[in-house]
Image (cartoon, rainbow, N blue to C red):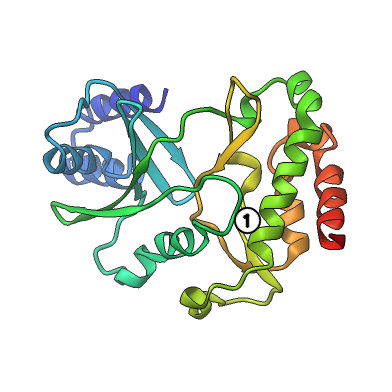
Amino acid sequence: MWKLFFQVCNFLCNFIPNRRVRERVRREQLYDWRKKYKALRAAFPELNFRNMRMIKGGWNIGFIVDNKYVFKIRKFYDKKIPAEKIMREKRITDAFENVVPLMIPKIELVESMGYTFYKYNFMPGKNMNWFSQKTINKYAKRWGKQLAEFIWAMHNTEPKQIADLKDRPGDGWNHNDICNNVIVDKKTMKIVGIIDWEYSGWGKLETEFENCIKFSDKVKNSGIGDIIRAEYAKTLKK
C-alpha cells in the first residue's frame, strides 16, 4: 500500500512547476524515499527488488525486500546526526538479544551513498493488531502471558553495555511500543517476536503496561492489559 502511495505522489510532484518547491515536497512529505531506495539498490544489487513493499511508522520508513530482509531509515535523514544516536536502537536490541524470551531483530548497519540503513531479517507472521477483535479476544490469555514474561525479562535486566542510555527517570528498560509491534505465528497462534525498537528506553513499568494497549482499541477491548498485569505479578512471585 505505502509503495503505491509514494509512487503516485512522486509522480504527481512532476507537475509542480517550481523546482525548489518540488524538491521540498519530496524531501518533507515523501522523505526523499526515491533517493534512499536508489542507495539501497546500489548496496544490494543481488536482491530481488521487484518483490518490495514499503512500511512507514514512528521515525522511520522501511523497505521489505523479497520477504527476506527489512531495511529501515529515518524519515528525515540528517548527515549531522551523530553515529551514537543512529546506533541507539541497535545497541539496545543487541543488549537484549539473549535476555528476552521472544525473537527481536538482529540489526546490522548498512552505509550506502551517504545514508545509513538498519538491516535485519524479516520476521514472518502477522501483527497482533491486525487480527479481528474475535481472534484477539480468543488468544488474549495466551498472548498476555507471553507478553508479561517478555516485559519481566526486559524490565528486570540492566545490561551494562547500555547503562549510558538511561536518559530519563524510570525503574527498568521498556520497549515502549509493544501494542503495534507484536508478531504472531499464524500456524501456532503464538507470539514469535517483537519488532520496531526505535522508542525503547529506560522508563517506568507502568508506562510499559499502558503502552501495551494504548494504541489499539481492539487490543484494549480484549482485556489483555489486565491479563499482562496479572501474569507479571505471578512471575514476580516465582
Depth order, front residue of 18/198: 198
Task: Tell me what residue is drawn at x 71 percent, y 58 percent.
Answer: 152
Task: Tell me what residue is drawn at x 68 percent, y 42 percent.
Answer: 215
Left or right: 61, with 57 as reference point: left
The residue under label 1 is 176
User: Can you tell which quarter of the image residue 89 is in?
Assistant: bottom left
Depth order, front residue of 175/168: 175
Q: Which amino acid does label 1 sit on?
A: Asn
User: Can you tell which quarter of the image residue 141 is in?
Assistant: top right
Task: Tell me what residue is drawn at x 38 percent, y 42 percent.
Answer: 61
x and y percentages locating residue 79 in the rendered image: 24, 64
Instruction: Say which quadrant the C terminus sits in.
Output: bottom right
x and y percentages locating residue 27 in the rendered image: 28, 46
Mark 1: few/some/many CA within 10 Å (<14, 14-19, 20+): many
Left or right: 135, with 180 as reference point: right
Task: Tell me what residue is drawn at x 81 percent, y 54 percent.
Answer: 232
